[in-house]
Image: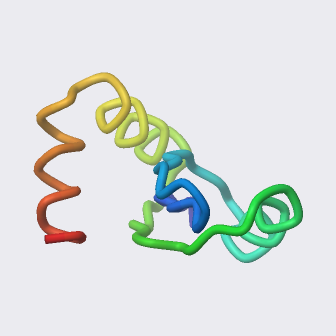
């Protein structure tokens, strides 16, 4: 499985969007650098699908704004 995930930094409330095959490991790596919360994730069968979704969220503001509205309020 591959995961598209969204982290929110605790200190400055910035968001970070990426994808990975090992979500737990990647979350631990992020928390070593900056304290953050796992805000949201989606699971995909293939890396290609996860990469496509990540790019869509990063490149198209409307996709990210719609998701942000659903998960944050």
Quadrant where the N terminus sits is bottom right
Residue drawn 23% across the image and 70% down it: 72
Residue drawn 88% across the image and 65% down it: 32
The percent coordinates of residue 67 (x first, y second) are 19, 56
The percent coordinates of residue 63 (x first, y second) are 17, 40
Q: How many marks?
A: 0
Front-lying residue, 56 or 35: 35
Quarter of the rendering containing residue 30: bottom right
Front-lying residue, 45 or 29: 29
The percent coordinates of residue 38 (x first, y second) are 53, 73
Residue drawn 49% across the image and 46% down it: 17
Q: How is the image coloured?
A: rainbow
The percent coordinates of residue 28 (x first, y second) are 81, 72
Toward the top, the furthest residue is 59
31 sits left or right of 64 in the view: right
46 sits left or right of 68 in the view: right
């Amino acid at each position: 499985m591959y995961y598209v995930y969204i982290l929110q930094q605790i200190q400055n409330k910035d968001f970070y969007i990426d994808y990975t095959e090992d979500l737990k490991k990647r979350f631990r790596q992020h928390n070593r650098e900056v304290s953050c919360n796992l805000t949201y994730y989606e699971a995909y069968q293939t890396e290609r699908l996860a990469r496509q979704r990540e790019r869509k969220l990063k490149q198209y503001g409307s996709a990210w704004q719609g998701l942000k509205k659903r998960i944050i309020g």
